[in-house]
Amino acid sequence: MSANVPDTMSVRLPTPVRLLERLSSATTSLWVKHDDQTDSEYGGNKVRKIGRLLDAARDRGCNKVVTLGAVGSHHVLTTGIFGKRAGIAVEAVLVQQPSTPHVLEVVRASVGQGVQVFPASSFLHAGLLALGRAARGAYYIPPGGSNSIGVLGFVDAAKELALQVQRGELPEPELIVVAMGSGGTAAGLVAGLAEQRLRTRVLAVTVSQPAFFVERSVRSLAKETATRLGVGPLSERLEQSRSYLGRGYGFATAEGDRATELAAQVGLTLDPTYTAKAFAAALDRVALGRERTVLYWHTLSSVPMARLLAEAPLEQALSPKVRRLAR
Ligand SMILES: *Cc1c(COP(=O)(O)O)cnc(C)c1O
């Protein structure tokens, strides 16, 4: 990004791939794509989308962006970090989600990066508030950064994977398993894999709601992206599963908790909202044994939060309005 960013704080691509031997079976090997390490300050999948989105804001002459999400949104934190690096102010409209220590750390870190928070009572209310901010000149970035611009970060990720396959770093996976929140990750991968002419299909594990809405918007974003890239039909490439959602967005599940324990044995730290549910699905696919190679796409930052939290207010110092969003 901008030239005055020290390279100790920077995007690190390609992210490594690794075989999880302990969790593989005789018929199916389980691999991980380490998007937890996309950046040295704060990793995760949102890093791949944010650079292009902030460039688009600047191209429009905006030095301010507005986005929205749940209170523990990794996308909002990523936007805050990269906005600060790029000298772009970040406003975020946030809605309630079940409180966990991780959710509270993420919102603290966002405020610490200078993100200005506008609490909303529902996603509908949040949309209206965000439109209001956009009308005052802030560039609008949708939830999760998932639009026709952000999605291109995952078209690039598919290309990155294709090169790793070509270089023999991993076998061509039959299936990628990834969490689906706002859907840009899955949609970009599906279109990008088609562009790369890989046979790889994507199992997108629904973790957010309304499920039918997310599932439909991912299909249309994938299709729109493929059309822009000039690649053929995607019908067989995208599989979606609601079986891991449990009570809903942000609520832990028993399968997710079990997956979290198994992941710890191979050095992966999961969160209950996204990655625990996706990893549970990946383990089930290994058990089914239909594919020879399953690639779990690890989307949660593994960079320690200590440095970000050192710049952040204590939980008690957050405004009561913000604290009420995590309960
Ligand atoms: C946002 C997020 C996802 C989902 O990505 P989308 O592109 O919004 O579908 C998955 N895992 C983690 C950890 C995330 O923060």
Image (cartoon, grey):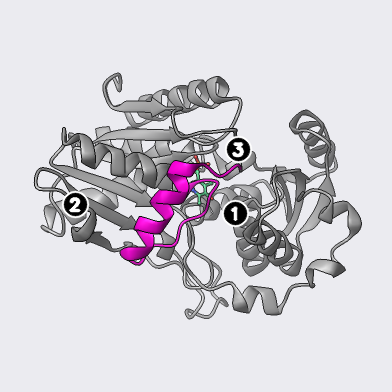
Q: Quadrant of residue 196?
A: top left
Q: Secondary structure at mark 1?
A: helix
Chain-order first, disc 3 or disc 2? 2
| Residue type highlighted by circle 3 | Tyr
| Residue type highlighted by circle 2 | Ser
Q: Does the residue tagged 1 have its C-beta within 8 Å of any atom of ligand 1? A: yes
On screen, residue 217 above or below 166: above
Q: Nearer the viewer, residue 231 or 161?
A: 161
On screen, residue 187 above or below 317: above
User: In the rendered image, which residue does mark 2 sit on?
Assistant: 24
Total marks shown come to 3
Q: Secondary structure at mark 3?
A: loop
Task: Check disc 2: other Cα within 10 Å, few if <14, some if 14-19, many if 20+.
Answer: some
Q: Alpha carbon of mark 3 to alpha carbon of mark 2: how far?
A: 28 Å
Q: Secondary structure at mark 2?
A: loop
Q: Which residues are magenta?
A: 251-275
Return the x and y of residue 96 as percentages of the image width and height: 75, 43
User: In the rendered image, which residue does mark 3 sit on?
Assistant: 249
Residue shown at the point (33%, 27%) measured from the top left = 238
On screen, residue 132 above or below 71: above
Return the x and y of residue 203 as percentages of the image width and height: 34, 33
Name the outermost residue toward the right.
320
Residue shown at the point (48%, 80%) measured from the top left = 8
Q: Is residue 86 left or right of residue 132?
A: left
